[in-house]
Image: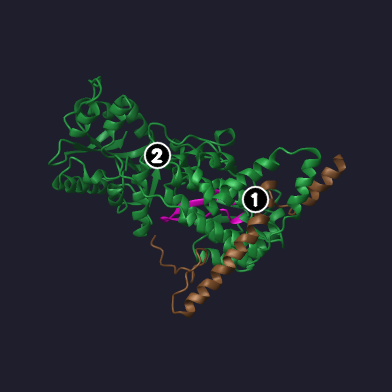
Amino acid sequence: MRFTLLTLMLTLSLDAAAYLDPGTGSLILQGLIAGIAVAGFTIKTYWYKLRSMFGKAPENSLLDDDEPESSDQTQ
Amino acid sequence: MSTLPSSFRDPSGFVFQYENRIYRQVNNVYAQSYEKFMICGLYEELTARKILIEHTEISDGALPRTDECHKILEPDQLRYISYPYEWSFSQLKDAALLTLRAQAIALKHGFTLKDASAYNIQFHHGRPVFIDTLSFEPYEEGKPWTAYRQFCQHFAAPLALMARTDIELGKMLSSHIDGIPLPLASRLLPARTWLSYPFLAHIHLHAKMQAGYADLAGENQSSSQDKASSSKVSAKGLRAIAESLASFVNKLDWTPPKTEWGDYYDHTNYNDEASQKKRELVDEFLSRIDSPLNIVQDLGANTGEFSRIATKHADLVVSQDIDPVAVEKNYRKSREDKDSKLLPLRQDLFSPSPAIGWANEERESFRERAGCDAMLALALIHHLAISNNLPLAHIANLFAALSKWLIIEFVPKSDSQVIRLLETREDIFDHYNIEDFERVFGEYFDLREKQTVHGSERTLFLFQRK
Protein backbone atom coordinates (compact mmCIF):
# COMPACT_ATOMS: atom_id res chain seq x y z
CA MET A 1 0.00 0.00 0.00
CA ARG A 2 2.74 2.38 1.02
CA PHE A 3 4.61 1.52 -2.18
CA THR A 4 1.51 2.22 -4.30
CA LEU A 5 1.05 5.61 -2.65
CA LEU A 6 4.69 6.50 -3.18
CA THR A 7 4.48 5.53 -6.84
CA LEU A 8 1.34 7.62 -7.25
CA MET A 9 2.95 10.60 -5.60
CA LEU A 10 6.00 10.29 -7.83
CA THR A 11 3.93 10.06 -10.99
CA LEU A 12 1.86 12.99 -9.78
CA SER A 13 4.87 15.26 -9.50
CA LEU A 14 4.88 16.18 -13.15
CA ASP A 15 7.76 18.57 -12.83
CA ALA A 16 10.65 18.27 -10.45
CA ALA A 17 10.99 22.05 -10.30
CA ALA A 18 7.42 22.68 -9.15
CA TYR A 19 7.70 23.83 -5.57
CA LEU A 20 4.10 24.87 -4.93
CA ASP A 21 1.45 22.45 -3.83
CA PRO A 22 -1.13 23.07 -6.53
CA GLY A 23 -3.88 21.42 -4.46
CA THR A 24 -5.65 18.30 -5.73
CA GLY A 25 -9.04 20.03 -5.77
CA SER A 26 -7.63 22.96 -7.74
CA LEU A 27 -6.11 20.66 -10.37
CA ILE A 28 -9.34 18.74 -10.87
CA LEU A 29 -11.41 21.91 -10.97
CA GLN A 30 -9.18 23.32 -13.70
CA GLY A 31 -9.93 20.35 -15.89
CA LEU A 32 -13.64 21.16 -15.53
CA ILE A 33 -13.53 24.90 -15.98
CA ALA A 34 -10.96 24.90 -18.78
CA GLY A 35 -13.54 23.27 -21.06
CA ILE A 36 -16.15 25.88 -20.21
CA ALA A 37 -13.58 28.67 -20.52
CA VAL A 38 -12.41 27.48 -23.95
CA ALA A 39 -16.03 27.23 -25.16
CA GLY A 40 -16.77 30.71 -23.81
CA PHE A 41 -13.62 32.07 -25.37
CA THR A 42 -14.42 30.51 -28.75
CA ILE A 43 -17.98 31.85 -28.75
CA LYS A 44 -16.69 35.29 -27.81
CA THR A 45 -14.10 35.20 -30.59
CA TYR A 46 -16.77 34.32 -33.21
CA TRP A 47 -19.14 36.91 -31.77
CA TYR A 48 -16.55 39.65 -32.20
CA LYS A 49 -15.71 38.40 -35.67
CA LEU A 50 -19.39 38.62 -36.52
CA ARG A 51 -19.63 42.09 -35.03
CA SER A 52 -16.62 43.25 -37.00
CA MET A 53 -18.34 42.14 -40.19
CA PHE A 54 -20.96 44.75 -39.35
CA GLY A 55 -18.33 47.39 -38.85
CA LYS A 56 -18.13 47.22 -35.06
CA ALA A 57 -14.67 47.41 -33.58
CA PRO A 58 -13.42 44.17 -32.05
CA GLU A 59 -12.91 44.25 -28.32
CA ASN A 60 -9.30 43.75 -27.25
CA SER A 61 -8.53 40.99 -24.82
CA LEU A 62 -7.55 42.18 -21.38
CA LEU A 63 -4.44 40.10 -21.72
CA ASP A 64 -3.14 41.50 -24.99
CA ASP A 65 -1.45 44.76 -25.57
CA ASP A 66 -1.26 45.54 -29.25
CA GLU A 67 2.27 46.81 -29.24
CA PRO A 68 5.02 46.72 -26.69
CA GLU A 69 5.03 50.01 -24.84
CA SER A 70 7.53 52.53 -26.04
CA SER A 71 10.32 53.37 -23.70
CA ASP A 72 8.97 56.79 -22.88
CA GLN A 73 8.76 55.90 -19.21
CA THR A 74 9.12 59.01 -17.14
CA GLN A 75 11.70 58.35 -14.52
CA MET B 1 26.36 37.27 1.31
CA SER B 2 23.13 38.16 3.04
CA THR B 3 20.25 36.08 1.68
CA LEU B 4 16.94 37.89 2.03
CA PRO B 5 14.74 36.13 4.60
CA SER B 6 11.81 36.21 2.16
CA SER B 7 13.69 34.20 -0.47
CA PHE B 8 13.62 30.54 0.46
CA ARG B 9 10.57 28.86 -1.06
CA ASP B 10 11.67 28.28 -4.63
CA PRO B 11 14.79 26.09 -5.07
CA SER B 12 15.41 27.72 -8.50
CA GLY B 13 17.45 30.47 -6.85
CA PHE B 14 17.41 33.16 -4.23
CA VAL B 15 17.81 36.88 -3.67
CA PHE B 16 20.67 38.33 -1.67
CA GLN B 17 22.07 41.66 -0.67
CA TYR B 18 25.70 42.55 -1.18
CA GLU B 19 27.14 45.98 -0.49
CA ASN B 20 23.71 47.61 -0.53
CA ARG B 21 22.69 46.13 -3.89
CA ILE B 22 20.19 43.38 -4.47
CA TYR B 23 21.19 40.35 -6.60
CA ARG B 24 19.53 37.11 -7.59
CA GLN B 25 21.39 33.82 -7.86
CA VAL B 26 20.08 31.35 -10.44
CA ASN B 27 20.74 27.82 -9.24
CA ASN B 28 21.97 24.99 -11.50
CA VAL B 29 18.64 23.18 -11.07
CA TYR B 30 16.95 26.03 -12.97
CA ALA B 31 19.79 26.65 -15.47
CA GLN B 32 18.08 25.07 -18.51
CA SER B 33 14.78 26.82 -17.90
CA TYR B 34 16.53 30.15 -17.36
CA GLU B 35 18.59 29.95 -20.56
CA LYS B 36 15.53 28.96 -22.58
CA PHE B 37 13.55 31.79 -20.95
CA MET B 38 16.22 34.28 -21.96
CA ILE B 39 16.63 33.21 -25.60
CA CYS B 40 13.08 32.27 -26.60
CA GLY B 41 11.91 35.90 -26.72
CA LEU B 42 9.84 35.75 -23.53
CA TYR B 43 12.19 37.87 -21.41
CA GLU B 44 12.44 40.36 -24.23
CA GLU B 45 8.69 40.69 -24.66
CA LEU B 46 7.96 40.87 -20.93
CA THR B 47 10.55 43.59 -20.34
CA ALA B 48 9.61 45.52 -23.51
CA ARG B 49 6.05 45.64 -22.18
CA LYS B 50 7.39 46.64 -18.77
CA ILE B 51 5.70 43.65 -17.16
CA LEU B 52 8.91 42.11 -15.80
CA ILE B 53 11.77 43.89 -14.09
CA GLU B 54 14.92 44.10 -16.22
CA HIS B 55 18.17 42.55 -15.10
CA THR B 56 21.76 42.21 -16.23
CA GLU B 57 23.85 39.10 -15.85
CA ILE B 58 26.86 39.75 -13.65
CA SER B 59 30.14 38.09 -14.48
CA ASP B 60 32.00 39.80 -11.63
CA GLY B 61 33.79 36.99 -9.85
CA ALA B 62 34.05 39.08 -6.69
CA LEU B 63 30.36 38.60 -5.94
CA PRO B 64 29.57 35.89 -3.42
CA ARG B 65 27.86 32.72 -4.68
CA THR B 66 27.07 29.23 -3.49
CA ASP B 67 28.13 25.91 -5.06
CA GLU B 68 24.74 25.63 -6.76
CA CYS B 69 25.25 28.87 -8.67
CA HIS B 70 24.53 28.99 -12.39
CA LYS B 71 24.43 32.75 -12.80
CA ILE B 72 24.12 35.95 -10.79
CA LEU B 73 21.61 38.57 -11.94
CA GLU B 74 21.45 42.18 -10.94
CA PRO B 75 17.87 43.41 -11.33
CA ASP B 76 16.85 47.02 -11.70
CA GLN B 77 16.94 48.18 -8.06
CA LEU B 78 13.67 48.93 -6.27
CA ARG B 79 13.49 51.94 -4.00
CA TYR B 80 10.76 50.79 -1.65
CA ILE B 81 9.15 47.44 -0.90
CA SER B 82 5.40 47.46 -0.30
CA TYR B 83 3.04 44.60 0.43
CA PRO B 84 -0.41 43.61 -0.87
CA TYR B 85 -2.09 44.43 2.46
CA GLU B 86 -0.87 48.00 2.03
CA TRP B 87 -2.26 48.43 -1.47
CA SER B 88 -5.52 50.06 -2.40
CA PHE B 89 -8.18 48.10 -4.26
CA SER B 90 -7.00 49.25 -7.70
CA GLN B 91 -3.36 48.57 -6.88
CA LEU B 92 -4.19 44.95 -6.04
CA LYS B 93 -6.39 44.72 -9.13
CA ASP B 94 -3.65 46.09 -11.41
CA ALA B 95 -1.18 43.65 -9.84
CA ALA B 96 -3.62 40.78 -10.53
CA LEU B 97 -4.11 41.76 -14.17
CA LEU B 98 -0.36 42.15 -14.62
CA THR B 99 0.17 38.61 -13.30
CA LEU B 100 -2.38 37.25 -15.79
CA ARG B 101 -0.78 39.19 -18.65
CA ALA B 102 2.56 37.65 -17.70
CA GLN B 103 0.93 34.21 -17.78
CA ALA B 104 -0.70 34.86 -21.20
CA ILE B 105 2.58 36.04 -22.72
CA ALA B 106 4.45 33.14 -21.14
CA LEU B 107 2.01 30.65 -22.70
CA LYS B 108 2.56 32.24 -26.11
CA HIS B 109 6.26 31.41 -25.77
CA GLY B 110 5.75 27.88 -24.46
CA PHE B 111 6.19 28.83 -20.83
CA THR B 112 3.91 29.14 -17.83
CA LEU B 113 4.00 30.94 -14.49
CA LYS B 114 4.86 28.46 -11.77
CA ASP B 115 3.62 30.74 -9.01
CA ALA B 116 1.25 33.68 -8.78
CA SER B 117 2.11 35.26 -5.46
CA ALA B 118 1.07 38.87 -4.91
CA TYR B 119 4.51 39.34 -3.34
CA ASN B 120 6.01 38.85 -6.82
CA ILE B 121 4.67 42.28 -7.71
CA GLN B 122 6.15 45.58 -6.61
CA PHE B 123 5.32 49.16 -7.57
CA HIS B 124 8.25 50.64 -9.44
CA HIS B 125 8.29 54.04 -11.14
CA GLY B 126 4.58 54.37 -10.45
CA ARG B 127 3.42 51.07 -11.93
CA PRO B 128 3.23 47.43 -10.96
CA VAL B 129 6.03 45.20 -12.16
CA PHE B 130 6.69 41.47 -11.82
CA ILE B 131 9.95 41.05 -9.91
CA ASP B 132 10.51 37.29 -9.73
CA THR B 133 12.52 36.47 -12.85
CA LEU B 134 12.66 32.77 -11.91
CA SER B 135 8.87 32.30 -11.85
CA PHE B 136 8.67 31.10 -15.45
CA GLU B 137 8.96 27.43 -16.35
CA PRO B 138 8.58 25.61 -19.67
CA TYR B 139 5.00 24.51 -20.23
CA GLU B 140 4.49 20.75 -20.26
CA GLU B 141 1.73 19.59 -22.58
CA GLY B 142 -1.47 18.93 -20.64
CA LYS B 143 -0.23 20.10 -17.28
CA PRO B 144 -2.76 22.23 -15.37
CA TRP B 145 -1.73 25.61 -13.97
CA THR B 146 0.14 24.94 -10.71
CA ALA B 147 -0.37 28.52 -9.58
CA TYR B 148 -4.15 28.63 -10.12
CA ARG B 149 -4.99 28.14 -6.45
CA GLN B 150 -2.37 30.68 -5.41
CA PHE B 151 -3.74 33.25 -7.84
CA CYS B 152 -7.23 32.80 -6.42
CA GLN B 153 -5.97 33.09 -2.83
CA HIS B 154 -3.66 36.06 -3.41
CA PHE B 155 -5.77 38.06 -5.85
CA ALA B 156 -9.25 36.84 -6.78
CA ALA B 157 -10.47 36.17 -3.22
CA PRO B 158 -9.24 39.40 -1.59
CA LEU B 159 -10.46 41.51 -4.52
CA ALA B 160 -13.86 39.80 -4.46
CA LEU B 161 -14.14 40.33 -0.71
CA MET B 162 -13.06 43.98 -0.95
CA ALA B 163 -15.53 44.65 -3.76
CA ARG B 164 -18.48 42.64 -2.49
CA THR B 165 -18.18 42.33 1.29
CA ASP B 166 -16.05 45.07 2.80
CA ILE B 167 -13.02 47.01 1.61
CA GLU B 168 -11.33 46.45 4.98
CA LEU B 169 -11.03 42.73 4.23
CA GLY B 170 -7.99 43.45 2.03
CA LYS B 171 -6.09 43.67 5.29
CA MET B 172 -6.70 39.95 5.86
CA LEU B 173 -3.73 39.42 3.54
CA SER B 174 -1.45 40.38 6.44
CA SER B 175 -2.80 37.58 8.61
CA HIS B 176 -2.73 35.01 5.78
CA ILE B 177 0.67 35.12 4.12
CA ASP B 178 -0.29 32.68 1.35
CA GLY B 179 -3.48 34.51 0.52
CA ILE B 180 -7.02 34.19 1.83
CA PRO B 181 -8.15 30.57 2.23
CA LEU B 182 -10.91 30.01 -0.30
CA PRO B 183 -13.36 28.33 2.11
CA LEU B 184 -13.09 31.43 4.31
CA ALA B 185 -13.57 33.75 1.33
CA SER B 186 -16.56 31.68 0.22
CA ARG B 187 -18.21 31.99 3.64
CA LEU B 188 -17.63 35.74 3.84
CA LEU B 189 -18.97 36.59 0.37
CA PRO B 190 -22.67 37.51 0.00
CA ALA B 191 -24.92 34.56 -0.90
CA ARG B 192 -25.95 36.13 -4.22
CA THR B 193 -22.41 35.67 -5.53
CA TRP B 194 -23.22 31.93 -5.84
CA LEU B 195 -25.38 32.95 -8.79
CA SER B 196 -22.50 34.53 -10.67
CA TYR B 197 -20.42 32.09 -12.73
CA PRO B 198 -16.89 33.46 -12.03
CA PHE B 199 -17.56 33.67 -8.29
CA LEU B 200 -19.06 30.19 -8.38
CA ALA B 201 -16.18 28.65 -10.35
CA HIS B 202 -13.11 30.39 -9.00
CA ILE B 203 -14.15 30.87 -5.37
CA HIS B 204 -17.16 28.86 -4.16
CA LEU B 205 -16.73 25.66 -6.13
CA HIS B 206 -12.98 25.96 -5.82
CA ALA B 207 -13.36 26.13 -2.03
CA LYS B 208 -15.63 23.07 -2.03
CA MET B 209 -13.20 21.11 -4.21
CA GLN B 210 -10.32 22.00 -1.92
CA ALA B 211 -12.20 21.04 1.20
CA GLY B 212 -13.40 17.84 -0.46
CA TYR B 213 -9.94 16.63 -1.40
CA ALA B 214 -7.93 18.08 1.45
CA ASP B 215 -8.34 15.52 4.18
CA LEU B 216 -8.75 12.32 2.23
CA ALA B 217 -6.54 9.50 3.36
CA GLY B 218 -5.70 5.92 2.36
CA GLU B 219 -7.52 4.51 -0.66
CA ASN B 220 -9.53 7.70 -1.11
CA GLN B 221 -6.33 9.66 -1.39
CA SER B 222 -4.99 7.44 -4.11
CA SER B 223 -8.20 7.78 -6.08
CA SER B 224 -8.12 11.57 -5.74
CA GLN B 225 -4.52 11.62 -6.87
CA ASP B 226 -5.49 9.49 -9.83
CA LYS B 227 -8.08 12.06 -10.73
CA ALA B 228 -5.61 14.89 -10.25
CA SER B 229 -2.95 13.31 -12.40
CA SER B 230 -5.48 12.57 -15.10
CA SER B 231 -6.68 16.17 -15.06
CA LYS B 232 -5.25 17.55 -18.30
CA VAL B 233 -5.47 21.13 -19.47
CA SER B 234 -4.27 22.16 -22.91
CA ALA B 235 -2.33 25.39 -23.51
CA LYS B 236 -5.53 26.73 -25.06
CA GLY B 237 -7.34 25.78 -21.85
CA LEU B 238 -4.76 27.58 -19.72
CA ARG B 239 -5.08 30.67 -21.86
CA ALA B 240 -8.86 30.50 -21.51
CA ILE B 241 -8.57 30.16 -17.72
CA ALA B 242 -6.32 33.23 -17.64
CA GLU B 243 -8.88 35.08 -19.82
CA SER B 244 -11.70 34.00 -17.53
CA LEU B 245 -9.80 35.17 -14.42
CA ALA B 246 -8.90 38.46 -16.11
CA SER B 247 -12.51 39.09 -17.03
CA PHE B 248 -13.58 38.23 -13.45
CA VAL B 249 -10.99 40.51 -11.85
CA ASN B 250 -11.60 43.31 -14.31
CA LYS B 251 -15.33 43.35 -13.59
CA LEU B 252 -14.74 43.56 -9.85
CA ASP B 253 -15.07 47.18 -9.04
CA TRP B 254 -15.15 49.26 -5.95
CA THR B 255 -16.72 52.67 -5.90
CA PRO B 256 -15.26 54.57 -2.98
CA PRO B 257 -17.98 55.91 -0.70
CA LYS B 258 -17.57 59.36 0.77
CA THR B 259 -15.62 58.91 3.98
CA GLU B 260 -14.19 61.09 6.66
CA TRP B 261 -11.02 61.67 4.64
CA GLY B 262 -11.81 60.93 1.03
CA ASP B 263 -13.35 64.37 0.58
CA TYR B 264 -11.10 66.03 3.11
CA TYR B 265 -9.79 68.75 0.85
CA ASP B 266 -13.31 69.90 0.09
CA HIS B 267 -14.21 70.17 3.76
CA THR B 268 -11.20 71.42 5.69
CA ASN B 269 -11.19 74.58 7.71
CA TYR B 270 -8.55 75.87 5.35
CA ASN B 271 -9.76 78.59 3.08
CA ASP B 272 -8.31 78.79 -0.41
CA GLU B 273 -5.73 81.34 0.58
CA ALA B 274 -4.48 79.39 3.62
CA SER B 275 -4.39 76.23 1.54
CA GLN B 276 -2.30 77.93 -1.13
CA LYS B 277 -0.02 79.37 1.55
CA LYS B 278 0.48 75.94 3.09
CA ARG B 279 1.43 74.48 -0.30
CA GLU B 280 3.95 77.26 -0.81
CA LEU B 281 5.43 76.76 2.65
CA VAL B 282 5.83 73.00 2.19
CA ASP B 283 7.50 73.64 -1.16
CA GLU B 284 9.77 76.27 0.37
CA PHE B 285 10.74 74.10 3.37
CA LEU B 286 11.57 71.20 1.06
CA SER B 287 13.80 73.52 -0.98
CA ARG B 288 15.64 74.48 2.20
CA ILE B 289 16.82 70.91 2.72
CA ASP B 290 20.31 70.88 1.28
CA SER B 291 20.91 67.13 1.21
CA PRO B 292 19.61 64.90 -1.62
CA LEU B 293 16.16 63.46 -1.03
CA ASN B 294 15.95 59.88 -2.22
CA ILE B 295 12.85 58.96 -0.28
CA VAL B 296 10.27 61.22 1.32
CA GLN B 297 7.57 59.71 3.54
CA ASP B 298 4.28 61.58 3.67
CA LEU B 299 2.40 60.21 6.68
CA GLY B 300 -1.28 61.01 6.87
CA ALA B 301 -1.02 61.94 3.22
CA ASN B 302 -4.76 61.80 2.49
CA THR B 303 -5.15 61.94 -1.31
CA GLY B 304 -1.55 63.04 -1.78
CA GLU B 305 -1.87 66.77 -2.42
CA PHE B 306 1.35 67.58 -0.55
CA SER B 307 3.08 64.38 -1.66
CA ARG B 308 2.82 65.72 -5.20
CA ILE B 309 4.65 68.88 -4.17
CA ALA B 310 7.35 66.69 -2.61
CA THR B 311 7.83 64.74 -5.86
CA LYS B 312 9.48 67.87 -7.28
CA HIS B 313 12.22 67.49 -4.66
CA ALA B 314 12.65 63.74 -4.24
CA ASP B 315 13.16 60.53 -6.23
CA LEU B 316 10.26 58.79 -4.51
CA VAL B 317 7.46 59.96 -2.24
CA VAL B 318 5.72 57.24 -0.26
CA SER B 319 2.29 58.66 0.36
CA GLN B 320 0.64 56.78 3.22
CA ASP B 321 -2.77 57.12 4.78
CA ILE B 322 -5.14 55.05 6.88
CA ASP B 323 -8.20 55.71 4.73
CA PRO B 324 -8.83 53.26 1.86
CA VAL B 325 -10.84 55.87 -0.06
CA ALA B 326 -8.07 58.47 0.12
CA VAL B 327 -5.43 55.92 -0.95
CA GLU B 328 -7.62 54.67 -3.79
CA LYS B 329 -8.12 58.24 -5.05
CA ASN B 330 -4.42 58.93 -4.66
CA TYR B 331 -3.46 55.84 -6.69
CA ARG B 332 -6.03 56.46 -9.43
CA LYS B 333 -4.73 60.00 -9.87
CA SER B 334 -1.08 58.92 -9.87
CA ARG B 335 -1.91 56.24 -12.46
CA GLU B 336 -3.78 58.73 -14.62
CA ASP B 337 -0.93 61.24 -14.36
CA LYS B 338 1.67 58.49 -14.99
CA ASP B 339 3.38 59.82 -11.89
CA SER B 340 6.58 57.81 -11.60
CA LYS B 341 7.64 59.25 -8.25
CA LEU B 342 4.57 58.66 -6.11
CA LEU B 343 3.71 55.49 -4.22
CA PRO B 344 0.33 55.65 -2.43
CA LEU B 345 -0.08 53.07 0.33
CA ARG B 346 -2.45 52.25 3.17
CA GLN B 347 -0.94 52.53 6.60
CA ASP B 348 -2.57 52.68 10.01
CA LEU B 349 -0.01 54.50 12.13
CA PHE B 350 -1.78 53.47 15.33
CA SER B 351 -0.92 49.91 14.41
CA PRO B 352 1.40 49.86 11.39
CA SER B 353 2.18 46.82 9.21
CA PRO B 354 3.82 44.17 11.39
CA ALA B 355 6.71 41.88 10.43
CA ILE B 356 5.13 38.62 9.24
CA GLY B 357 6.07 35.19 7.94
CA TRP B 358 8.69 32.74 9.11
CA ALA B 359 10.65 34.00 12.14
CA ASN B 360 8.85 37.32 11.62
CA GLU B 361 11.39 38.03 8.90
CA GLU B 362 9.76 37.31 5.56
CA ARG B 363 7.86 40.58 5.23
CA GLU B 364 9.31 43.54 7.04
CA SER B 365 7.41 45.79 9.38
CA PHE B 366 6.52 49.36 8.49
CA ARG B 367 9.24 50.58 10.83
CA GLU B 368 11.95 48.49 9.19
CA ARG B 369 11.07 49.94 5.78
CA ALA B 370 10.04 53.50 6.60
CA GLY B 371 13.50 55.07 6.95
CA CYS B 372 13.65 58.17 4.78
CA ASP B 373 15.50 61.40 4.09
CA ALA B 374 12.55 63.64 4.87
CA MET B 375 9.12 63.18 6.34
CA LEU B 376 5.93 65.18 5.99
CA ALA B 377 3.51 65.03 8.91
CA LEU B 378 0.84 67.55 7.98
CA ALA B 379 -2.45 67.81 9.87
CA LEU B 380 -1.47 64.60 11.64
CA ILE B 381 -0.21 65.44 15.11
CA HIS B 382 -3.66 65.99 16.67
CA HIS B 383 -4.79 62.55 15.51
CA LEU B 384 -1.75 60.93 17.10
CA ALA B 385 -1.68 62.97 20.29
CA ILE B 386 -5.40 63.29 20.96
CA SER B 387 -7.23 60.47 19.14
CA ASN B 388 -4.55 57.96 20.16
CA ASN B 389 -3.47 59.60 23.46
CA LEU B 390 0.19 59.53 22.37
CA PRO B 391 2.59 61.64 24.43
CA LEU B 392 4.46 64.12 22.19
CA ALA B 393 7.80 62.51 23.10
CA HIS B 394 6.66 59.16 21.65
CA ILE B 395 5.83 60.85 18.37
CA ALA B 396 9.10 62.83 18.22
CA ASN B 397 11.05 59.70 19.10
CA LEU B 398 9.61 57.66 16.22
CA PHE B 399 9.87 60.44 13.66
CA ALA B 400 13.52 61.08 14.63
CA ALA B 401 14.26 57.36 14.32
CA LEU B 402 12.85 57.33 10.78
CA SER B 403 13.87 60.58 9.17
CA LYS B 404 16.71 63.09 8.97
CA TRP B 405 14.36 65.93 8.16
CA LEU B 406 10.84 66.58 9.34
CA ILE B 407 8.23 69.00 8.11
CA ILE B 408 5.47 68.94 10.67
CA GLU B 409 2.34 70.98 11.19
CA PHE B 410 1.20 71.83 14.70
CA VAL B 411 -2.59 72.05 14.99
CA PRO B 412 -3.58 73.90 18.20
CA LYS B 413 -6.54 73.18 20.44
CA SER B 414 -8.30 76.25 19.10
CA ASP B 415 -8.41 74.69 15.61
CA SER B 416 -11.88 73.47 14.64
CA GLN B 417 -10.56 69.97 13.83
CA VAL B 418 -9.16 69.62 17.36
CA ILE B 419 -12.30 71.11 18.91
CA ARG B 420 -14.23 68.40 17.10
CA LEU B 421 -11.93 65.67 18.48
CA LEU B 422 -12.34 67.00 22.01
CA GLU B 423 -16.10 67.54 21.77
CA THR B 424 -17.03 64.11 23.05
CA ARG B 425 -14.27 63.49 25.55
CA GLU B 426 -12.54 65.03 28.51
CA ASP B 427 -9.53 67.19 27.68
CA ILE B 428 -6.69 65.41 29.48
CA PHE B 429 -4.07 66.91 27.20
CA ASP B 430 -2.47 69.69 29.26
CA HIS B 431 0.80 69.31 27.38
CA TYR B 432 -0.78 69.62 23.97
CA ASN B 433 0.28 73.18 23.19
CA ILE B 434 2.79 74.75 20.83
CA GLU B 435 5.33 75.55 23.56
CA ASP B 436 5.50 71.98 24.83
CA PHE B 437 5.48 70.69 21.26
CA GLU B 438 8.49 72.82 20.37
CA ARG B 439 10.32 71.89 23.59
CA VAL B 440 9.74 68.13 23.19
CA PHE B 441 10.61 68.01 19.50
CA GLY B 442 13.62 70.24 20.27
CA GLU B 443 15.08 67.36 22.27
CA TYR B 444 15.32 65.24 19.12
CA PHE B 445 15.62 67.85 16.38
CA ASP B 446 17.14 71.25 15.67
CA LEU B 447 14.61 73.81 14.58
CA ARG B 448 15.41 75.16 11.12
CA GLU B 449 12.23 77.03 10.19
CA LYS B 450 8.95 77.95 11.82
CA GLN B 451 6.10 79.76 10.09
CA THR B 452 2.45 80.33 10.79
CA VAL B 453 0.21 79.20 7.99
CA HIS B 454 -1.34 82.49 7.03
CA GLY B 455 -5.11 82.47 7.36
CA SER B 456 -5.18 79.53 9.81
CA GLU B 457 -4.22 78.85 13.40
CA ARG B 458 -1.65 76.28 12.43
CA THR B 459 2.15 76.45 12.39
CA LEU B 460 4.56 74.66 10.11
CA PHE B 461 7.98 73.55 11.40
CA LEU B 462 11.09 72.39 9.59
CA PHE B 463 13.26 70.23 11.84
CA GLN B 464 16.63 68.59 11.26
CA ARG B 465 17.52 65.52 13.30
CA LYS B 466 20.24 66.12 15.92
**Which structural element holds mark 2?**
loop
Quarter residue B102 falls in: bottom right
Tell me: residue B186, above or below residue B113.
Answer: above
Residue B91 image position (x, y, % from top left): 44, 51
**Which structural element holds mark 1?**
strand
- The segment highlighted magenta reads B116-134
Q: Residue furthest left?
A: B455
* B133 is within the stretch colored magenta: yes
Is residue B332 toward the left or the right of residue B282 in the image? right
In this view, the residue in front, B187 or B124, is B187
Is residue B393 toward the left or the right of residue B72 in the image? left
> Which quadrant does the C terminus of chain B fall into?
top left
Chain colored green: B
Chain where mark 2 sits? B
Is residue B104 toward the left or the right of residue B387 in the image? right
Specify the label residue B347 is tagged with.
2
